[in-house]
């Protein structure tokens, strides 16, 4: 914290300048750091602890849905990667290639997985023979590399990232579609309930769907600058990969059939969305359900009151262990220094305890999200703490929801959309033709960020003409600037 | 199971031919599979579930020791890898190099991490400034690639593997040494208590220590053919890396000092040791504490008794949920088929329940390790199941311990060692000179598999002359064939 003033300046500029604030808060809160490899970051323990919580929650949800974890090789032979044409076109420009091992050239280049469809489906074609082998629902928590050449941004655009990739196979189209919807609902619930972020459930446009999918769905979030960012996604791949990788099974009627497949993923990118969305001028603001330290106790004492205060602080700390309370008992820092540090690190709730509090049998609670202070009787702390943590979680979500609602607009004409598209997402009638979307990209630097889906996964229908080309609208879609 | 006869033949050959039995049991039990990338395997859900249990236990133990998880980039620039000379010499012959991304050549080659000292310590040198920043105890659970050219064997020698790598930094030599010993004890306890494998705590010889370490310690296990295999290890690196990577701190006296470091690891290789050590002619035998399914219920019924049997089986399954009971309710397979399958998969305990059992209010328990059958009153099942699981865990460990003891010999002369070294580990007086060890390697295809350590980490002292060169023995060491 040597350059604390500089930090304060950068942080105070959140609204004014996200581009300065965002990396600064990530570095100073010790979530992550840059590395010697351009575009790749180090996830430090504080950031990794958030990722561990994300993994724990999502992993449990996936297991409840019958998905099993496994691990496939990092490296994929070039010939295997090339089997599904749309897929290979989508990914090869960003592949990191291994061409040498030790001092020898390899006969065939090996791709570091940008995603694992190709190597997994090669095994699937061996393992799946009969309807008895289906459904096959596998998932990996792993690292992938996509050597993007755009300007890197920690979490939001890193050349290597951690994620889950689920790859499921079904005996029928109906089962596959149902499952892909359940997966999207699971992710949507995670984003809203745990990350406290408003998430829009959408279907991707033809231009934006996953390379190899029949259609793609995703949860989209809004960043503080009003640009949208894609969160977790769920793709229905139909029989495309099954045909390319020869995944066939003998059905109950004794006939050979190609299988139906889905893929889905959530990545550490969401940590970046979390940081940007909830953070403020003093640093991170973490939702209690994902905070590595939900509650910190800062004892306040002088030499003569130290023993008494520390005794009480330890007592409270033990009693409140199940809420993830951390007692900051470091002697080399002042309480004021600690307040700043834990605020920077976004700890949702601070408990202050000093000699006067002990006299009054109370403590001070300070909320990170609102800064609100309250005095609470020690005897009531056990009930009050979970209550306040719950209130913080809800408040963060409500703020996020309100923000997205306020920034969601409708446009009837191209001119109207043009006026609104900077800082908002704009719902319009759309033909869903890639050419139309490319035109908007070129002219407005904006693209679709999804076709809205209702609770039953019906895509919003168009009600007139595409506001770009004037042909019949096949759907409604959001256009916005995006990450 | 189409080729069940062939499988049975291969499995029955365990004692006769480990080389056939070992891969066959791994493939047929669906622990792992080969992949399109030579030397790299797919960890299938059943194998991954064992790895998840290993990770869960070790991770909890590490966290209790104050170690925190983090994630560093997969790729390491060539120049960074080259900073510590012994280290780079040890690893570069096996490095997989990324030289191209997309269609462009890279300016500098990037190594896929064979281990992460070099990239982690580059960050450490930035993060560590003062005694306040120490100790720093970080760990990664990740994948590494070592492109070995020896014949690959699933788990035991794979070109990519999963592991943990711990990298800790201390302000004093004393602290570092103490911590490295605690880590070795933790691993040793894990190997014996959870894997049910006898593990020998040893110090590695000068010839066998880790590239870059001052000294290395490890837990060594014996495979069924009497060859030794290295398990988890714990290295004291002194200030070697700190000097190469400039990791310095201001101590409490205001002076700059190089820090003291350790590294430690356990890899999925241990799954291979587990398979080979406990397995038998019928397949895997898993210790209850690491078995993905500790107990399976197989219901036995005909059409007229199905309803009654299934009702009872479901009841028992629910009651016993906390022991990890799985009810095999598949209708497309016979009980006999299921018995074979779960035996092949090494499930420690089988519960059989049929109409006659229900009449007698009892069930049949069948132990996988001994094949022993017993009849147990349903009312006593809740107490009996954990009791039997415990007995199985103990029995597997005792067998492993007895085997290691029987195969541990002492030799007074080189000729005696030569006679004993095939299928045993042989304790001899040794000078600990690399030249002497290389001689044994050349002549007997054997090497040291450690200098015995007592409970207080004292290395066994030599009591006479090195049986190889005749110079004064500085220690006692085991020689054996090894993996």
Image (cartoon, coloured by chain):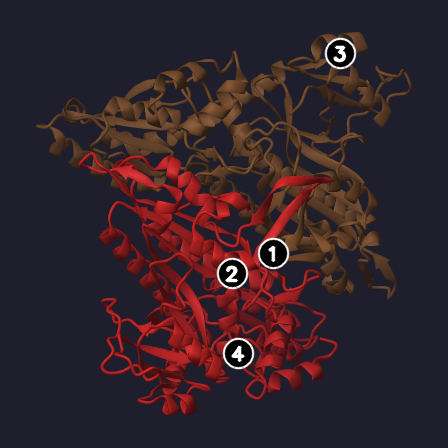
Chain colours: A red, B brown
Q: Chain of mark 1?
A: B
Please give the label number shown on residue B417.
Answer: 3
Which of the two discs, 2 and 4, labels the residue nearer the N terminus? 2
Disc 2: which residue: A51
Residue B361 lies, in percent from the top left, at 18, 27
Among the 4 quarters of the image, the one containing residue B252? bottom right
Residue at 62% in and 57% down: B103
Residue B156 lies, in percent from the top left, at 58, 30
Q: CA distance from mark 4 to mark 3?
A: 68 Å
Quick check: can you spot residue B471? yes
Q: Chain of mark 2?
A: A
Q: Where A426 sits versus B312, above or below?
A: below
Q: Is residue A232 left or right of residue B440?
A: left
Of the pair A422 and B427, the residue shown nearer to us: A422
Of the pair B245 and B254, the residue shown nearer to us: B245
Disc 4: which residue: A279
Among the 4 quarters of the image, the one containing residue B388? top left
Label 4's element? loop
Q: Chain of mark 4?
A: A
Disc 1: which residue: B71
Tags 2 and 1 in contact by the CB under 8 Å rule?
A: yes
Tags 1 and 3 in contact by the CB under 8 Å rule?
A: no
Categorize mark 3 by other alpha carbons within 10 Å: few (<14), some (14-19), many (20+): many
Tags 1 and 4 in contact by the CB under 8 Å rule?
A: no
């Amino acid at each position: 914290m040597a350059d604390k003033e500089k930090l304060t300046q950068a942080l105070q500029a959140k609204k004014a300048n996200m581009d300065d604030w965002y990396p600064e808060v990530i570095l100073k809160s010790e979530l992550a750091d840059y590395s010697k490899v351009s575009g790749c970051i180090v996830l430090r323990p504080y950031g990794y602890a958030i990722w561990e919580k994300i993994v724990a929650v999502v992993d449990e949800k996936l297991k409840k849905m019958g998905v099993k974890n496994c691990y496939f090789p990092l490296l994929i032979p070039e010939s295997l990667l090339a089997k599904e044409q749309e897929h290979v076109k989508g990914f090869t420009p960003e592949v990191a290639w291994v061409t040498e091992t030790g001092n020898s050239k390899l006969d065939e280049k090996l791709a570091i997985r940008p995603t694992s469809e190709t190597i997994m489906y090669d095994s699937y074609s061996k393992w799946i023979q009969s309807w008895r082998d289906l459904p096959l629902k596998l998932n990996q928590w792993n690292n992938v590399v996509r050597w993007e050449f755009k300007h890197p941004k920690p979490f939001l655009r890193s050349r290597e990232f951690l994620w889950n990739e689920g790859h499921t196979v079904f005996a029928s189209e109906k089962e596959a579609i149902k499952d892909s919807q359940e997966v999207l609902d699971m992710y949507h619930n995670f984003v809203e309930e745990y990350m406290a972020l408003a998430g829009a459930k959408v279907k991707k446009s033809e231009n934006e769907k996953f390379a190899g999918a029949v259609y793609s769905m995703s949860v989209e979030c809004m960043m503080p600058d009003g640009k949208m960012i894609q969160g977790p996604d769920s793709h229905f791949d139909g029989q495309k990969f099954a045909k390319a990788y020869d995944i066939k099974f003998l059905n109950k009627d004794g006939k050979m059939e190609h299988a139906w497949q889905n893929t889905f993923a959530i990545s550490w990118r969401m940590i970046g969305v979390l940081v940007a969305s909830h953070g403020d001028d003093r640093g991170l603001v973490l939702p209690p359900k994902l905070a590595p330290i939900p509650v910190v106790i800062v004892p306040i004492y002088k030499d003569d009151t130290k023993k008494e205060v520390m005794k009480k602080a330890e007592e409270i700390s033990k009693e409140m262990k199940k809420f993830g309370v951390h007692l900051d008992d470091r002697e080399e820092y002042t309480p004021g220094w600690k307040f700043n540090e834990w605020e920077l690190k976004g700890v949702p709730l601070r408990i202050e305890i000093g000699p006067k509090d002990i006299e009054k049998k109370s403590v001070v609670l300070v909320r990170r999200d609102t800064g609100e202070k309250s005095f609470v009787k020690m005897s009531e702390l056990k009930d009050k703490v979970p209550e306040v943590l719950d209130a913080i979680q809800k408040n963060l979500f409500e703020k996020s929801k309100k923000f997205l609602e306020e920034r969601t607009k409708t446009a009837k004409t191209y001119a109207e959309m043009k006026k609104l598209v900077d800082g908002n997402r704009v719902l319009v009638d759309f033909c869903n033709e890639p050419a139309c979307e490319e035109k908007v990209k070129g002219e407005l630097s904006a693209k679709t960020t999804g076709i809205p889906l209702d609770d039953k996964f019906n895509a919003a229908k168009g009600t007139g003409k595409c506001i770009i080309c004037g042909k019949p609208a096949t759907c409604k879609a959001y256009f916005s600037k995006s990450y």
